[in-house]
Amino acid sequence: MAKTVLGIDIGHDELKLALVRGGRVVKVATATMPENLLREGRITSRESLGELLRATMKENGIRANHAAFVIPNETVFIKNVEMPWMTVDQLEYNLPFEFNDYITGELKDYVFDYAVLNSPDDGAAQAGEDGEAAGEADGESGSGIMELMAVGTLKAVLEDAQEVLRKAGLRLVMSAPGLCAYINLLRRQKDDLTQVADEFGILDLGYSSIRMFMFREDRHIATRVLEVGLSTLDDVLADAYGVDVHLAHTYLMTNYENCQQREECAAAYENIAVELMRALNFYRFSNPGTALSDLWLCGGGAVIEPLAETIGDMLNIQLHPAAELVPGGDMVEDCNTYVQAIGIAMG
């Protein structure tokens, strides 16, 4: 990847940019997303988003030629797969069929990729960034089981991203799910993290959903998705103040009149924490002997301190700011918000 890369993370309500050079964050910037410009993870207007991106770069003095794009969670499928060891050609043919239960429409409308997680020789976990499989050199399959992290998304999603970036004068050099952005950071901080815990989670407190990613060191184990997010708090404040949800969201994120401490919000925090506790209990039940004891918080909800405190208390788990995952993250303002944009640019 290019030495200087602009990481781009588009969300429901914010466009987040992180300029990374030599493994360090040079500058971050954000802009408000117009209503319905992103719908169920799909860009609805390439022209409008391209103009917003170009204007945000200009306003913040960001100059870059290369960009890395976070594929929205709603448009990507991620699956841990075990398959007989095979050549690259065999794998490229067989992998799409692993997603039959997830996708609609024709397989030809999707693009698939993978990372090999183990070695055919000793089974040791390794980064399979270039996706090389055993037997590639001689065209023969290996023996045993290969472990993969496989991803799939619509070709149209990547085409949208490429066109948006082109309109902003950028060339796409990397596109991957937010999970891959986290893995990029975990690999860089691996030694520091294992001093805290060998098994841990990253909690992405998003607008329409919350995602809990579980890891052992830098290896993804499972993801739990909760169909609840900051929009729940917007609804609560909209009712309390008699305003629309868009203004209520502004109130929430700016803590207008100390609204984050309102009794109605406290009840919503507890409901969110209960749902997280159920997801965590299910994970522990499904993974006997799990030692998960630490969570790193990121996403828009990470800046809402009463929410974080409620989650920590009810889950009885140690919480950390996701800025700890970023080299020099303590020097990046509102770093927790930009974690995915930073991580994708560091791939």
Image (cartoon, grey):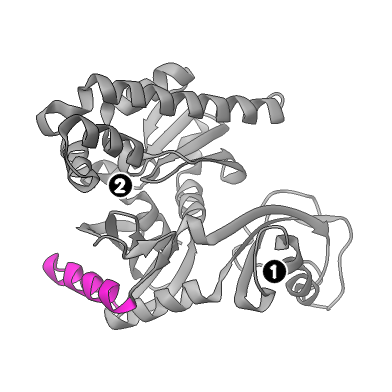
Distance of label 2 from label 1 (alpha carbons): 33 Å
Give the left or right position of residue 176, taking residue 21 as reference: right
Considering depth in this image, is 327 or 96 the residue closer to the camera? 96
The picture places residue 326, in percent across and down from the top left corner, at 36, 47
Which of 163/271 is in front? 271
Number of the front mark, 2 or 1: 2
User: Which mark identifies residue 113?
Assistant: none
Residue at image coords 28%, 58%: 16
For the N terminus, the quadrant is bottom left
Q: Look at 38% across and 69% down and name the residue there.
A: 43
Residue at 49% from the left image edge and 56% from the top image edge: 74
- Residue at the image point whose x is 34% and y is 21% from the top: 267
Q: Quadrant of residue 232?
A: top left
Q: Amino acid at mark 1?
A: Glu
Q: Nearer the viewer, residue 305 or 240?
A: 240
Residue 234 in the image, given as x and y percentages of width and height: 27, 39
| Residue type for callout 2 | Thr
The reply to whether residue 292 is in sight is: no
Query: According to the image, label 2 marks what residue?
Result: 337
Label 1: state its secondary structure: loop
Q: Is residue 153 above or below residue 145?
A: below
Q: Which comes before the other along the chain, label 2 or label 1?
A: 1
Could you tell me how many numbered marks the image carries? 2
- Residue 285 at x, y = what percent? 68, 25
* Up-down relation of residue 159 to residue 127 (above or below): below
Residue 280, quarter of the rendered image: top right
> Compared to 118, does 273 lie above or below?
above
Horizontal side of 64 relative to 344 (left or right) equals left
Q: Which residue is mark 1?
A: 132
Look at the image and give the residue range highlighted in magenta.
46-65
